[in-house]
Amino acid sequence: MEAHESRPSAEAARELLNEAGRLESASRAAAGWPHIAMLLGLGAITSLSMLSLWFVARFDEALVALPIASMLIWLAIFMVFMIVFGRSTKRGFGRRWMTFMMIWAALWVVGILLASTVLSGQLWFAILIAAAITVNSVAGAWLEARK
Amino acid sequence: MTEGTSGPHDHGGHPRLKLSDQLSHPVRFSLVAALAGTEESEFAVVRDHLQVSDSVLSRQASQLEAAGLVRIRKGFVGKRPRTWFALTPAGRTAWEQHLGALREIANESLPSSDL
């Protein structure tokens, strides 16, 4: 029998297309939640850390290690969850992840540098950076969840 | 993507001739379908979606890798070995062509005697 003689009928082709769509949707739906948790967690801990650092600088700079240590512990927890349970990534995730991380890193570096130098003790600046980190994080997680 | 489709019944541009033999196998079809929506998927996730045994999945994935349609990456998470699958650019192209051919077949109105 020739190979093409066993090719699917129109009805079989429709069933195959439905099956392909179902599998693609199922695999995409199962992917991503550890990465979404990481995006939200990173935004939460770093934005709150910006505010914590303002409090520390204002009231007792000797306690600066406390918010930093708390942030690093939670960062490690979120990273472990993402690495262990992130068994599948949605199509295009790598590009979106890089974009989100570059924006986050820029906000974090600018926030820490300016808050510890020329804008030290400025509450409005800490709130501004914390808000920007929050928006970036939520937008990234929302986008990922909707894909 | 027309391997194994030439012969005395060759109908030129008929959509059946555009189907990939590699992707016509049921497990390989499902494997590529599951990978199409993802950038990379771990072995166990794909196995659970496809509801096949480890050996069947390994064998079919290796065939797709040999054909250049799937990339297989091995690594560790902690001390546990893991295997990840991803479609190569050629695999994604082949999948789109295969789906396109299926859509053409699904939409055609040929009499059943021509099948």
Image (tube, coloured by chain):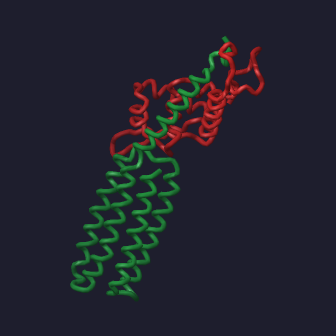
Q: Which chain is red?
A: B
Residue at (23, 73) in percent of width and height = A66
For the C terminus of chain B, the quadrant is: top right
Reply above or below: A122 against A82.
Answer: below
Reply above or below: A46 against B104.
Answer: below
What x and y, as percent, mark residue B65?
Answer: 56, 33
What x and y, as percent, mark residue B70?
Answer: 55, 36
Q: Residue furthest bottom?
A: A118
What x and y, as percent, mark residue A60?
Answer: 21, 84
Displayed quadrant of residue A70: bottom left
Q: Is residue A139 left or right of residue A65?
A: right
What x and y, as percent, mark residue A32?
Answer: 41, 49
Reply above or below: A44 against B113.
Answer: below
For the N terminus of chain B, the quadrant is: top right
Residue A93 vs residue B65, the one in the foreground: A93
Q: Which chain is green?
A: A
Residue at (51, 36) in percent of width and height = A21
Displayed quadrant of residue B20: top right
Residue B111 vs residue A109, the one in the foreground: B111
